[in-house]
Image (spheres, rainbow, N blue to C red):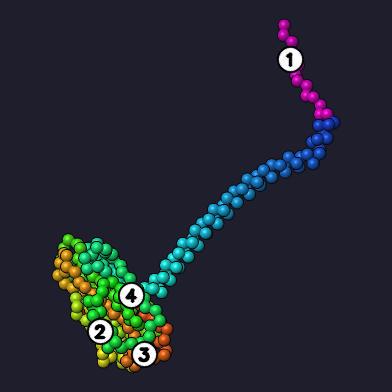
Amino acid sequence: MFGNKKSKIEQPITPEELSKLNDKTIADAQIEHFHVTNDSIEIVKYKKRRKLLSIILTVCMIILIILFFVSMLVTQWGDLIISVDSPAVKKGIILSEDPEFKTQSASLTAKQVDNVTNITYEWLPIDLDTSANGPHNGDNYVAYTFYCKNNGQATLDYDAVLDINGVAKSADEAVRVMVYKNGEPAIYGKGKYDDRNTAETDCTKFETDTIVMSTATEDFKVGDVDKYTIVIWIEGNDPECIDDIRNGHVRMRMLFSVRDDETTAPQ
């Protein structure tokens, strides 16, 4: 015969346990410990995010500083830049300071002349196109000789445009640019200040206020080479060669591009 199982009698709470439950200091200490632990985790995460953000900002600042100095170098020292656009590069147009093309590039930069003063055409050497390759500046003038070659696989037509992309103190009003192409020179200057449609007496007028000149070459066969020499100076006989342009500058770029069948040559 089975007897009834006695139910478990719950032990009464002792006065000590009741005291602990009613003791807010102990309860708050446990809660505080829980919050401190979670707050510590959040603080660590915050510090990591802050450190990562600082690294990102530092890297961005370094990149901006590098870009600034590169831009400043180009602005201060790139008085004459020669370059080939991307489509022309793909078709094989290359540049070099060396007629043998032992070194070649899609972009060349002439050296700057510092502390220039005005001179006149008669003061320039007569052998500027034949004396040297690459940069061969003289007192108060820029002289740069380079070569353009068809290193591609087909005959093509190309255009070259020399334009002004930077001016200070209206120095372009008195500038002269002489361009030799395969030994043939031509001198260019801005139109008269009071009559832009009229050229100065000693030169051909710029094509526009910013385009000095352009040239077109047709049937440029594989292996063909064109030679260019560019000379830049401030013409002392120009009526606009006045004190107002002192410490001014003129920056130029010559860009080579390939002409497709539907493009017409510059006039």
Query: What residue do we see at 81% from left, 32% from top?
Result: 17
Q: Secondary structure at mark 4?
A: strand
Residue 193 higher or lower than 53, as above or below: below
**Left or right: 112 in relation to 23:** left
The kind of residue tagged 2 is Ile
Q: Which residue is mark 2?
A: 187
Sequence-first disc among 4 and 3:
4
Q: Amino acid at mark 1?
A: Lys
- Residue 161: quadrant of the picture: bottom left
Q: Secondary structure at mark 3?
A: loop
Q: Which residue is mark 4?
A: 80
The residue at the point 72 percent across, 43 percent down is: 32
Q: Disc 4 and disc 3: Cα gap in Å?
A: 21 Å
Q: Amino acid at mark 4?
A: Leu
Q: Position of residue 165 (x, y in %)?
A: 35, 77
Q: Which residues are magenta?
A: 1-14
Q: Earlier in the sequence, mark 1 or mark 4?
A: 1
Crowd class of label 4 (few under 14; some 14 to 19; many from 20; radius 10 Å):
many
Closer to the chain start, of discs 3 and 1, is: 1
In the rendered image, which residue does mark 1 sit on? 5
Q: Earlier in the sequence, mark 3 or mark 2?
A: 2
Q: Which residue is mark 3?
A: 241
The residue drawn where x is 41% and y is 74% is: 76
Contact? badges 3 and 1 (CB < 8 Å): no
C-alpha span from label 1 to label 2: 123 Å
Query: Upstream in the sequence, badge 1 or badge 2?
Result: 1
Q: Quadrant of residue 228?
A: bottom left
Gap between marks 4 and 2 measured at Cα:
16 Å
Residue 255 in view here: no
